[in-house]
Image (cartoon, rainbow, N blue to C red):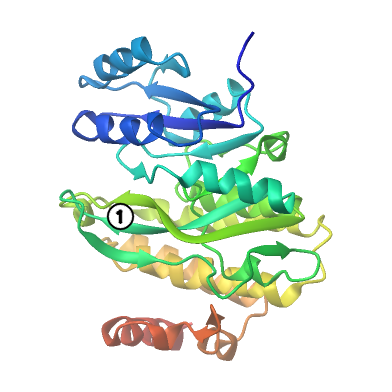
Amino acid sequence: MSMIYKVSVIVPVYNVEPYLRKCLDSLINQTCKEIEIIIINDGSTDNSQLIIDEYALKYDNIKTIVQNNKGLSEARNTGIKHSSGEFLAFVDSDDWIEKDMLHEMINLAKKHSADIVLCSLQNINDQGKILKKLPELHQLPERIDLTQDFTIFGEMSCFACNKIFKRELFNDISFPKNMHFEDVATIPRLFLKARTIAKSNKYFYQYLVRKGSITRNYTIKGINIFDAIDMVKRDFIKSVYVKNLQDWHKFIIFQGFYCFLAYYAYVKNSTSRNQMFAKLRKIITSEHITKKQIFTYNRFKKNYLCSLSLKKIVFYVLQLIKL
């Protein structure tokens, strides 16, 4: 008799040989045993596949897929297509999760009949030292009825990795191909289909910040965040939440202004910077968002701008003046 899985954990892999064992160990040692682990080797050129094969021989609940390099979104979509669990989870192959994460999140899903369950996460370095804690909506109750309180939409992170989702939410949604900020284009649209959210305040997800990762290329592709916002808007105006205009504006302020500019700050090419800022100005104007709204934007019941370092405050204020 085949196992009925509660969770399908989708793990895209691309050249992560030094980190892969720690990731997979954290999955096979979960206290929740009704999980299938779907590993998609997205064209790795290192020894990642040897490690994958080793684990697949030992554990019957591991399913492996090898494909040509297509990028993170298509690797995730491949995993979704081959999944059978009631819920889906996404784990990056250089990260790891605490052993009780899936057990607790599934229990919360059952307890509250939730469509999505989320937890907090933290950035760690190669030595496992905590660099930064990223609390996720700690000010909200364990159960959130979105029809009664939609504030989560304008305050949540758009990470896929610290959440589990009912598989049926993906029936007509997939991660967009060849797009930066694919999570921004996808996660909010899943929330628009949901009714009940549950959350744990525990820092279950460990997000690895690799040494030197800050030097990665920042290019004009950062402008994709506005394409992502357009995709979300198309679903928002058709959703039952369309009257929540204030939360829609907060979503744009957080993702389109603050998150976008956090990326834009590292773009060196002046032509790209000019094009990107022009796009920012256009969306802020077209959505009738005022500078006062941006200044007074609250996240987790605190003024977001004032919660940042002085250096970041100065940067954001200067960009705001330019709008």
Q: Nearer the viewer, residue 86 or 106?
A: 106
Residue 209 in the figure: left or right of residue 115: left
Image quarter for residue 273? bottom left
Q: Compared with residue 36, is residue 214 higher up or lower down, i.e. above or below? A: below
Picture coordinates of residue 63, whole percent (x, y): 47, 16
Q: Compared with residue 171, is residue 315 higher up or lower down, i.e. above or below? A: below
Residue 19 in the figure: left or right of residue 12: left
At mark 1, the secondary structure is loop
Q: Specify few, some or many for label 1: CA neighbours under 10 Å numbering under 14, 14-19, or 20 or more.
A: some
Picture coordinates of residue 260, whole percent (x, y): 44, 65
Q: Identify the residue at image location x=70%, y=58%.
A: 233
Q: Identify the residue at image location x=81%, y=56%.
A: 239
Image quarter for residue 301? bottom right
| Residue type at tag 1 | Tyr
Can residue 234 be seen here? The reply is: no
Residue 51 in the figure: left or right of residue 65: left
Q: Identify the residue at image location x=33%, y=51%.
A: 207
Residue hosting label 1: 218
Q: Nearer the viewer, residue 170 or 182?
A: 170
Can residue 240 be seen here? The reply is: yes
